[in-house]
Image: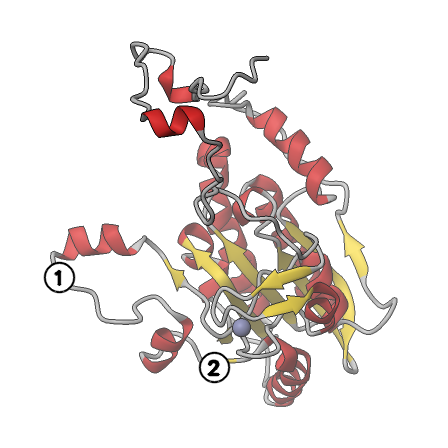
């Protein structure tokens, strides 16, 4: 490697460029130039990575341990960071009370889908990096004093996309809740249907909705909790079918993206469109519940709904 001064080091984008000799003033050839301060592309970080996280809303640096202890909610401004399915479950259920269902269920690459990378290789990579088998964890656990069927999605697994495993695990959970006469809580976060599974992913919308209809017929409560972001096929099926629909503060919730809606309606969208707060003010969401209050509020909601359960529908 050449270390000769003043020889322009080729950059990646220079390969096809003709060689150009830089114009160098005589003074630069005889004097040692001082490095310019403040023009470097990277600054030396004096904070080790992985210990601190910067809040995207208030720019406060938060010690990761404190952030985890605060359920991934900024201690200063209350910004809700993404949380994984396992940590959400741990924050809600009583210790050792969660019995997971269908933990080993995995997707079959029926379509042999290949794009930039094959679906099979993507699945294998997510299994390894997330420790999850798919984008939802389901099971029965105790919240407060109530046995509850609980399903929690994880955006970290392929964008929380709903494929056949998400649909099947949730359907089995809903059916178990109906058979055991349990209240149901589903915490959603999703980019929508899993395109790698084509029609099989779209079928899950109807399947989960049908299972919920039987659960509703038995007059059992279903609380849907929407977290950032909950969109598309998930929002168009089980996420919007709760007896109570609650959301985390600031969550983006919607079916199609704002650009698509704007192009279709040819109208300016109102400020705050598709946020949890906007949707609560316009009646789609019943309440906004901060993550730190979720457990306590769920217990109250379940108690109220079970108390006012009424008779199962005969229809
Ligand atoms: Zn903050």
Q: Nearer the viewer, residue 73 or 97?
A: 73
How many residues crowd mark 2 within 10 Å: few (<14), some (14–19), many (20+)?
A: some
Residue 194, given in percent of the width and then of the height, sits at 49, 40
Residue 154 position, x and y percent, is: 61, 53
Left or right, 304 with reference to 275 = right
Q: Earlier in the sequence, mark 1 or mark 2?
A: 1
Q: Counting other residues with Cα less than 10 Å from the Cα at mark 1, is it few (<14), some (14-19), or many (20 or more)?
A: few
Q: How far across and down, in percent of the image, does residue 142 sit?
A: 79, 73
Q: Residue at x 65, y 37 (%)?
A: 126
Question: Where's residue 152, x and y in %?
Answer: 64, 59
Q: Which mark is residue 287?
A: 2
Confirm if mark 1 falls within 8 A of ligand 1.
no
Camera-side residue: 40 or 204?
A: 40
How many angstroms separate mark 1 from mark 2 (CA)?
28 Å
Q: Is residue 85 left or right of residue 249?
A: right
Q: Residue furthest right?
A: 96
Q: Residue at x 34, y 24 (%)?
A: 26
Q: Which mark is residue 3?
A: none
- Quick check: marks 1 and 2 in contact, CB under 8 Å? no
Which element type, helix, strand or loop, lies under badge 1?
A: loop
Please, is residue 269 above or below residue 130 in the view? below
Q: Residue furthest left?
A: 266
Q: Is residue 179 visible?
A: no
Q: Which residue is mark 1?
A: 267
- In the rendered image, the vertical position of residue 297 relative to residue 269, given as above or below: below
- Between 173 and 137, which is closer to the camera in this rendering? 137
Classify mark 2: helix, strand or loop: strand
Q: Quadrant of residue 211?
A: bottom right
Placement of 31 over or under 148, stated as above or below? above
**CB at disc 2 and ligand 1 closer than 8 Å:** no
């Amino acid at each position: 490697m050449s270390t000769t001064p003043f020889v322009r080091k080729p950059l990646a984008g220079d390969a096809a460029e003709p060689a150009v000799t830089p114009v160098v003033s005589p003074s630069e050839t005889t004097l040692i130039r001082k490095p310019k301060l403040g023009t470097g592309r990277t600054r030396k970080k004096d904070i080790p990575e992985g210990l601190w996280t910067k809040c995207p809303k208030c720019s406060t640096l938060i010690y990761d341990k404190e952030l985890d202890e605060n359920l991934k909610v900024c201690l200063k401004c209350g910004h809700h960071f993404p949380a994984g399915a396992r940590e959400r479950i741990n924050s809600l259920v009583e210790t050792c009370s969660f019995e997971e269902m269908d933990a080993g269920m995995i997707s079959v690459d029926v379509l042999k889908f290949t794009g930039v990378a094959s679906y099979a290789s993507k699945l294998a990579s997510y299994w390894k990096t997330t420790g999850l088998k798919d984008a939802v964890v389901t099971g029965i656990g105790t919240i407060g004093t109530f046995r509850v069927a609980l399903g929690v999605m994880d955006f970290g697994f392929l964008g929380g996309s709903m494929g056949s495993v998400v649909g099947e695990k949730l359907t089995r959970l809903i059916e178990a809740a109906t058979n055991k006469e349990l209240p149901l809580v589903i915490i959603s976060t999703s980019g929508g249907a899993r395109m790698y599974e084509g029609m099989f992913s779209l079928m899950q919308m109807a399947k989960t909705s049908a299972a919920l209809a039987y659960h509703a017929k038995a007059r059992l409560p279903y609380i849907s909790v929407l977290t950032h972001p909950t969109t598309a096929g998930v929002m168009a099926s089980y996420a919007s079918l709760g007896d109570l629909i609650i959301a985390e503060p600031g969550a983006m919730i919607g079916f199609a993206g704002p650009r698509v809606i704007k192009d279709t309606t040819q109208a300016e969208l109102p400020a705050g469109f598709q946020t949890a707060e906007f949707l609560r003010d316009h009646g789609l969401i019943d309440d906004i519940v901060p993550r730190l209050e979720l457990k306590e509020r769920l217990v109250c909601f379940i108690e109220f709904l079970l108390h006012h359960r009424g008779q199962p529908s005969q229809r």
